[in-house]
Image: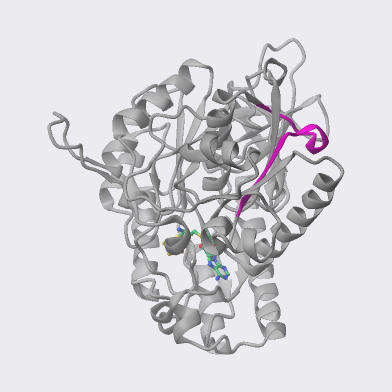
């Protein structure tokens, strides 16, 4: 069974995933590349762009690193631990290379951007270093590296969106796909390295996004997730001389939803300051726009939010939650939370726990603060919450979230939901796994003599649950 594509923003289960293409036959290529991806969904989507560029150069994907001519690691810098994991992998690959000279090792993504040529000069771990906006130069860099030169391109761009490159879908179940709609980030959250590693925000040409989503639907995909660090600030301004109007995120969402009522549309991530009533009303108007919003709060304390430079207060965030509930009563809300940011007191931490209650998150991505070199927080504030205390607070946040998730899932028992079938459940080929519009995973038995297949919609009545899974039967 192919691995299931989820819409999680930073899915722990996918870290280090090697990819294999969904459609292309790797045997039709003379050379092989192997790529492992870390970090957020944007990185996984970028690996699909890289695969497309490499295919054109005659490299087919392999999951077997031993047979690869080219080994790439698409990296994440968001927390120190993510970088440590990548370093360890690069050391493993370097060892492998010593038994197979001629293999090239490359580092892609945020860590390449952050450390630049240090990888070549100090760490001597790799042959090629490529930042997130420089993947088009891969063919040249590979040639240079093959000639024995060390190759680096970490130039950030104000325009690059890879709009014209059709990604090669990797590890997809053929039902759900990710579509990148913008790159970079202009927000300067003080804890975050992304604005430094991925550059200025830019929106991809709307027509190319809609075209890609339509192609996916025609190929049989039933769900697209529009991706960006901050999708709600999507704003496409056509180039001079083009006869198109500017496109806002609400308008883009609507145009994608109009491709077909059979195509589910999701999006991630929303910065709370940018999600507008227009977006919420568009979601309400289209049944196929999934009722699930990822609205990272980071902290429940106004004082900490100010230090984080999140540009909203606790009260403002709570009003946003109220507005979502008012316009979209059946919408699930998920969040990202950081425990132990600089100067965080017990009172601030209690504010985080209470805003979790207020927002009733269905799911949360929870981390303890990890200081990142070059960020505003690293330059301005002291990382003064002891590690043990950060871990203790994180544990309390996780326990709170587990309880909230369980309570919420219990409310679904007895209800009937429209579920999109993703494929066989991991445990048994006699069961389907699918998701509701709220992005909750549902497991249910296959019906004898029924002709259901993955990609179909079915109505499922829920009979039981855990804090992360619903169980039911087709009605
Ligand atoms: N753009 C998204 C937003 O604004 O919500 C988030 C993107 S970031 C890649 C994913 C998450 O990583 C953040 O929401 C934050 O919770 C977490 N994160 C970022 N920097 C961090 C740090 N230095 N330490 C711990 N967690 C961090
Ligand atoms: Fe990082 Fe903030 Fe941009 Fe999200 S919005 S990527 S947390 S700077």
Out of 379 and 248, give the one closest to the viewer: 379
Instruction: Answer left or right for 266 relative to 211.
Output: right
Out of 15 and 130, give the one closest to the viewer: 130
Instruction: Answer left or right for 93 relative to 318.
Output: right
Residue at 55%, 89% (x, y): give it: 345
Residue at 30%, 40% (x, y): give it: 282
Instruction: Answer left or right for 241 relative to 327.
Output: left
Which quarter of the image is occupied by the C terminus?
A: top right
Residue 247 location, quadrant = top left
**Residue 362 to residue 1: above or below:** below
Q: Residue 288: x and y, percent? A: 43, 31
Q: Residue 155: x and y, percent? A: 43, 53
Q: Residue 196: x and y, percent? A: 44, 63
Residue at 50%, 69% (x, y): give it: 298
Query: Can the viewer see residue 293 in this picture?
Result: yes
Query: Can the viewer see residue 472 in this picture?
Result: no
Q: Which residues are magenta?
A: 60-75
Q: Does residue 267 belong to the magenta stretch?
A: no
**Residue 187 to residue 202: above or below:** below
């Amino acid at each position: 069974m192919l691995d299931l594509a989820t819409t999680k923003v930073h899915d722990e289960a996918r870290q280090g995933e090697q990819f294999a293409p969904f459609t292309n036959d790797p045997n039709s290529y003379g050379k092989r590349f192997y790529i492992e991806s870390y970090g957020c969904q944007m990185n996984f989507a970028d690996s699909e762009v890289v695969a497309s560029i490499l295919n054109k150069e005659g490299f087919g994907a392999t999951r077997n690193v031993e047979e690869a001519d080219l080994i790439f690691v698409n990296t994440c810098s968001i927390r120190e631990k993510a970088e440590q994991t990548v370093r360890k992998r690069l050391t493993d690959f370097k060892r492998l290379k010593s038994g197979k000279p001629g293999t090239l090792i490359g580092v892609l993504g945020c860590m390449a951007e952050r450390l630049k040529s240090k990888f070549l000069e100090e760490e001597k771990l790799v042959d090629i270093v490529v930042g997130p906006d420089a993947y088009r130069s891969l063919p040249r860099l590979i040639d240079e590296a093959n000639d024995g030169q060390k190759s680096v391109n970490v130039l950030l761009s104000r325009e690059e969106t890879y709009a014209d490159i059709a990604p090669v879908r990797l590890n997809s179940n053929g039902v759900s796909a990710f579509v990148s709609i913008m790159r970079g980030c202009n927000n300067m959250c003080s804890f975050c390295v992304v604005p430094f590693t991925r550059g200025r925000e830019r929106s991809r040409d709307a027509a190319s996004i809609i075209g890609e989503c339509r192609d996916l639907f025609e190929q049989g995909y039933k769900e697209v997730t529009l991706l960006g660090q901050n999708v709600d600030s999507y704003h496409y301004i056509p180039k001079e001389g083009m006869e198109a109007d500017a496109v806002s995120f609400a308008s883009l969402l609507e145009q994608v939803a109009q491709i077909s009522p059979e195509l589910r549309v999701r999006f991630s991530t929303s910065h709370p300051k940018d999600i507008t009533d227009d977006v919420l009303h568009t979601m309400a108007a289209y049944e196929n726009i999934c009722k699930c919003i990822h609205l990272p709060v980071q902290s429940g304390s106004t004082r900490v939010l100010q230090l984080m430079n999140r540009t909203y207060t606790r009260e403002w965030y709570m009003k946003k939650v109220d507005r979502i509930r008012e316009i979209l009563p059946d919408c699930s809300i998920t969040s990202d939370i950081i425990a132990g940011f600089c100067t965080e007191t017990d009172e601030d931490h209690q504010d985080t726990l209470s805003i979790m209650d207020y927002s009733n998150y269905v799911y949360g991505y929870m981390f303890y603060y990890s200081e990142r070199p070059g960020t505003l927080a690293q330059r301005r504030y002291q990382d003064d919450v002891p590690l043990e205390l950060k871990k203790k607070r994180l544990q309390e946040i996780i326990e709170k979230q587990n309880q909230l998730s369980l309570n919420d899932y219990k409310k679904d028992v007895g209800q009937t939901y429209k579920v999109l079938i993703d494929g066989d459940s991991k445990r048994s080929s006699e069961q389907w796994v699918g998701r509701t519009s709220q992005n909750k995973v549902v497991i249910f038995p296959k019906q004898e003599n029924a002709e259901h297949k993955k990609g179909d919609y079915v109505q499922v009545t829920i009979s039981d649950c855990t804090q992360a899974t619903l169980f039911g039967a087709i009605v």
